[in-house]
Amino acid sequence: MTAQDRRAARADTADLVVIGAGVVGAAAAYFAARSGLRVTVVDRGPLAGGTSSAGEGNLLVSDKEAGPELDLALYSQRVWREELAEHAGLWEFESKGGLVVASSPDSAGPLAELVREQRAHGIDAVDVPWDELRDYEPHLSPKLAHGVYYPQDAQVQPMLVVAHLLRMARQAGAEVRTDTEVTGFLRAGERITGVRTARGPLAAPAVLNAAGTWAGTVAELAGVRVPVLPRRGCVLVTQPLPVMIRHKVYAAEYVGDVASSDAALQTSPVVEGTRAGTVLIGSSRERVGFDRHVPPSVLAALARNAIALFPFLASVQAIRSYLGFRPYCPDHLPVIGPDPRAPGLWHACGHEGAGVGLSVGTGKLLAQALTDRPTDLDLTPFSPERFERALPGDEVTRDVP
């Protein structure tokens, strides 16, 4: 019997239904299928149609403070670099490293404290005095005070990650159904036993909510609360250039913006080149629901910030911009694992801007848990039921797509 015949024979049943064909859902599907589970992925749109199509593909440890997210980032790095190393070329894995720069002694102090904590947890960080910064990036502004180089930072092309992980999941027997919206859940008492979709029911003893910025809405269909909200971000793209920026370069203030719970607009310079020669310029963060209208002032702020780091960009043309919505959780930790409030429901969501980097670690850990194996990392800090108690800055209202 061919793989196609096997999929047809179980068209309406699976061991695991994954809701969401973005990078996190794709990674979970791949590792689960490779572990022997019969997996069906469903998505209301196309592959990588949400946040995964609007990111820069960063695999970062440099912006992580000590704690569970850093542990997951380091674990995911090992998966990217070891277990998935043979596939690196498929998704344009580039171990370019990251350079974090401080514009003044005031910002250099907090950066130094962050580095001390990171080194204690296994991050490789190299101090770069102001007079050596141009050895790393020849076109950097000479006005910067200090820097830190992170050789573990890397980059991939996220849409290629989604496409190839799902292709490999299919080769392991998984099925992928696009344009298939989940409208509800099947139940046996309190237990989730599958999903209802616009194309009919799909039975499974386990359902994984990997719906990105819509994960909160999916959770509500199951009667549980997971406060994932959209956090909008924009990127400017320049005309193609010769190679002028070697690493991912960002200001030290970016780390604070990532950890902030402020709903208002925040911008800090993040600049990196691509293989195609274009330069990607970020970053902005604001919680405005799913509003896709970006004021020109936001793009102007991105441009000004980038020019402060790389003055040559003042004469470079921006050819387009794009935006996306990060799946934000109030405590800045993703939601990973089974939900005891609705047995049979699992979650893999709320990774905010780190979803690409954390996806493969998340997927491998879930595959271990779903097949009753010990997990390489403790999933307790990411548990869904933590939202039963109040969180600082938690929202009462909900954004609706």
Image: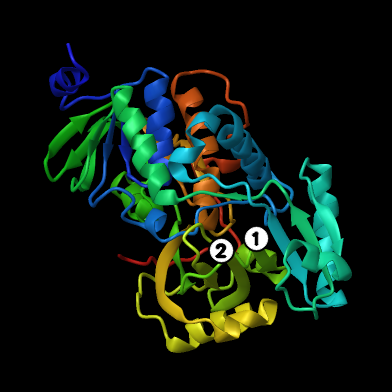
Name the residue rendered at 45%, 56% in the picture: 227
Q: In which quarter of the image is residue 269?
A: bottom right
According to the picture, the residue beneath numbered tag 1 turns out to be 246
Residues under labels 2 and 1: Cα distance? 7 Å
Considering only order in the chain, which callout, 1 or 2, is on the residue closer to the N terminus?
1
Residue 278 located left or right of residue 2: right
Counting other residues with Cα less than 10 Å from the Cα at mark 2, is it few (<14), some (14-19), or many (20 or more)?
many
Which residue is at 54% across, 40% downward? 383
In the image, what residue occupies the spot 60% across and 29% down? 82
Dot 1 amino acid type: Arg
Structural crowding at the residue carrying mark 1, measured as other residues with C-alpha within 10 Å and reported as few (<14), some (14–19) or many (≥20)? some
Q: Is mark 2 on a helix, strand or loop?
A: strand
Query: What is the quadrant of residue 209 in the picture?
Result: top left
- The quadrant in which the N terminus is found is top left
The picture quadrant where one finds residue 180 is top left
- Total labels: the figure holds 2
Q: Is mark 1 on a helix, strand or loop?
A: loop
Residue type (three-letter) at the residue carrying disc 2: Gly
Is the C terminus in the top left, top right, bottom left or bottom right quadrant?
bottom left
Image mark for residue 273: 2
Q: Where is residue 250 in the image (x, y as percent from the top left)?
A: 67, 67
Viewer-side residue, 254 vs 240: 240
Relative depth, front residue between 350 and 149: 149
Location of residue 121 in the rendering, given as x and y in whole percent from the top left corner: 78, 42
Q: Can residue 16 be seen in this view?
A: no
Q: Do the residues labelled 2 and 1 touch (CB within 8 Å)?
A: yes
Q: Is residue 352 above or below residue 8?
A: below
Q: Position of residue 297 (x, y in %)?
A: 49, 88
> Who's the residue at 44% across and 87% down the image?
296
